[in-house]
Image (cartoon, rainbow, N blue to C red):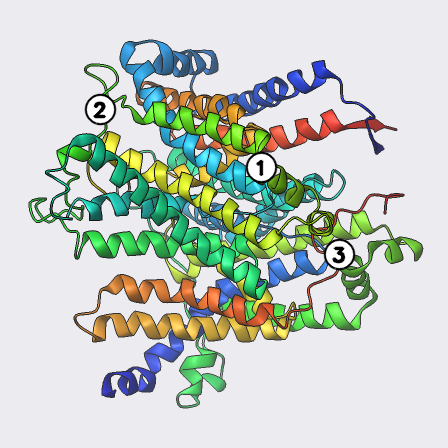
Amino acid sequence: MRFERRERPSAALTLLAPLGAIASALAMAGALIALAGANVAEAFGLILQGAFGSRLGITETLTRATPLILTGLAAAVAFRARLWNIGGEGQFYMGALAVAAFGLVPGLAGAPAPVAVLVCLVAGALAGMALLLVPVVLKLRFGSDEVVTTLLLNFVAILFVSMMIEGALRDPLAFGWPQSVPVPDAALLPQLVERSRLHAGLLIALAMAVAVWWVQERTVFGMRTRAAGLNARAAAFAGVPLGRTLVLVGCLSGGLAGLAGAIEVMGVKGYVTTDLSPNYGYSGIVIAMLAALHPIGVIGAALFSAVIFVGADSMSRALGVPSYIADVTVALSLLTMLVALFLVQYRVRR
Amino acid sequence: MSVIVDILASVGMWEAVLRIATPLILGTLGVLLCERVGVLNLGIEGIMAFGAMIGWLTVYSGGDLWAGIAAAAACGAAFGFLHALMTVPLGLSQHVTGLGITLFASSVAYYVFRLAVPTATSPPTIEPFRPLPVPLLADIPFLGPVLFTQTAPTYLALVAVAVLAVVLYRTPLGLAIRMTGENPHAVEAQGIDPILVRIGTIMAGSALMGVAGAFLSLAAFNSFFPTMVQGRGWICIALVVFALWRPGRALLGAVLFAFFDAFQLRLQTAVDGVPYQLFLMLPYLLSILALVVMAQRARVPQALMQPYRRGER
């Protein structure tokens, strides 16, 4: 058996591949649900019902998709330039922490809401950027592999958050629970739908997806990132400043992940804890791959993951199937998607 | 200063070093094998989590401790096979596949764990490996307790270092493995199938990763809980660079790392006024430092992350 590159992958195949990938991931997840002794059809029904079946379900799904769109974009922009930023989780937390820290700045609480919101969003993005710039500089200066450094910095970042919310940023009114001081009201994001957790962060995330798409497709910088990702040596010969491009990509990627953390604090939680993120950073990597690194595709992939997570939560409560099934399903769809994308590119010959 | 001297003089600290080093030794050897044959295996973090879970589950449901180790090795090899299938014949991105394996293996591990123990708030314990004093040697003052009163899997890890060094540098198999990581085309020209060498070696390396995880639940602790691996897999990836892809240096790196870890754990309780999180950050920061320092000198296997396709150059 061998594989032969297709001259021109057919449009039908390109469209069908993701559907096939997701279908086979769901089938395997179904087998695991059956292992738990639950009725598979009923379980999938409950997942859909949990995610779409009610006003609460829909708003929760969209709320959950918001940080996922941003962390998905963060991974997608970096991966496109072959900058392996696996540190989205840490950058998310640094962004969240920056918002809590700005809450302490005198004057911000009294500032008009748009100013306070803007300041906090920028602070979050800058904090995420700063954390990613360390591995980017280490890569450029010393050639150390950014996969490992970004992964390890995730642990450092979360420990740093833990240190701050038990120290300088501790909420003295939280009865000893380690959590940060609350974000001032002026910096909270407005609700989008009454009596729900859905907030204006969703609009920011959607706008970011469009902005990233525009930057990638319509600017010199976007072209350079693609060139650097496709073939760094050829790009360097063609005059692409590799170092500068990589630093800028790092700023964009880290900034998006930091923004995700800031928005989650300003829109949903109102304060920082060390369990703020149920692996949003790592899920972002899956989402970027599911979207084949396309910024608009990220929206769809984030929605898919959000449906699985929100739906599986409510299914899990009803049927007693461990809610980890959501993580399994999403991880499986990453693996099946990789194979599906391969089959679009190659044909199998005996 | 006297605090530091006290810690360094205590036998307890030195006893802990090999115990902490064991999963790192096994994991680093696993990564080393995979990279020597030309494939990055970021699945390690998840494979360790699964190994820890399946090892614990085997013993919890009545199996022998060694059966737990064997189950972890077998499951590790199975995940390795999946990783190998995707990265070697298909030539998919090793970064993304490895992360996918990690997410998949760890989430399945937690899922199966929750199926086995649906409600327990504190994880159920098992009877773990007990220290096994080596006759005579264990009676040597200081060195006895530090080196020769470890659990059986620790001795196994030390033997694994020697075995791997011999296999890699003194056998035709080792030559084939190293050559596949340097120049798979040359291997093919010798009439050896580099794809098979890669698949087999990745499975062996991943089996070691599984055992590394099982050590955590069967010897270092006496139960399984999610978040148990805590980035140890990623640290192993960094240690391989520190080790310059050599088994002996992998042992050195793991022991050195474990020494700092054991030291900071004791310093945490001995020093007041410094947030404990700063100490906990040290292992991760040290790994990054080791990576930065050694990346300069590193001679990476030349075909690392280069997929091999017959007839393509």
Residue A25, image x, y percentages: 56, 24
The kind of secondary structure element at disc 2 is: loop
Residue at 59% across, 29% down? A217
Decide: is B152 above or below B144: above
Assess disc 2: are there few (<14), some (14-19) or many (≥20) residues with their C-alpha within 10 Å of its C-alpha: some
**Residue linked to disc 3:** B303
Chain letter for the residue marked with disc 3 in the picture: B
Alpha-carbon span between mark 3 and mark 2: 53 Å
Q: Residue A28 appears at what percent x and percent y?
A: 56, 25
Respond whether the residues carrying marks 2 and 1 are from the same subunit.
yes
Of discs 2 and 1, which sits in the foreground?
A: 1
Q: Is residue B298 left or right of residue A299?
A: right
Left or right, B282 with respect to B234, comes to left
| Residue that label 2 marks | A190
Return the x and y of residue B301 as percentages of the image width and height: 72, 62
- Closer to us: mark 3 or mark 2? 2
Residue A320 is at least partly visible in this image: no
Distance CA(mark 3)–CA(mark 1): 30 Å
Q: Estimate how packed mark 3 is, as few (under 14), some (14 to 19) or many (20 or more) residues with alpha carbons within 10 Å.
A: many
Position of A187 with respect to A39 (left or right) is left
Residue found at x 47% / y 75%:
B256
Q: Label 2 amino acid?
A: Pro
- Front one among A60 and A113: A113
Q: Nearer the viewer, mark 3 or mark 1?
A: 1
Q: Are marks 3 and 1 in contact (CB under 8 Å)?
A: no
Asked whether B90 or A95 is in front, the reply is: A95
Q: Is residue A243 left or right of residue B216?
A: right
CA gap between label 2 and label 1 equals: 32 Å
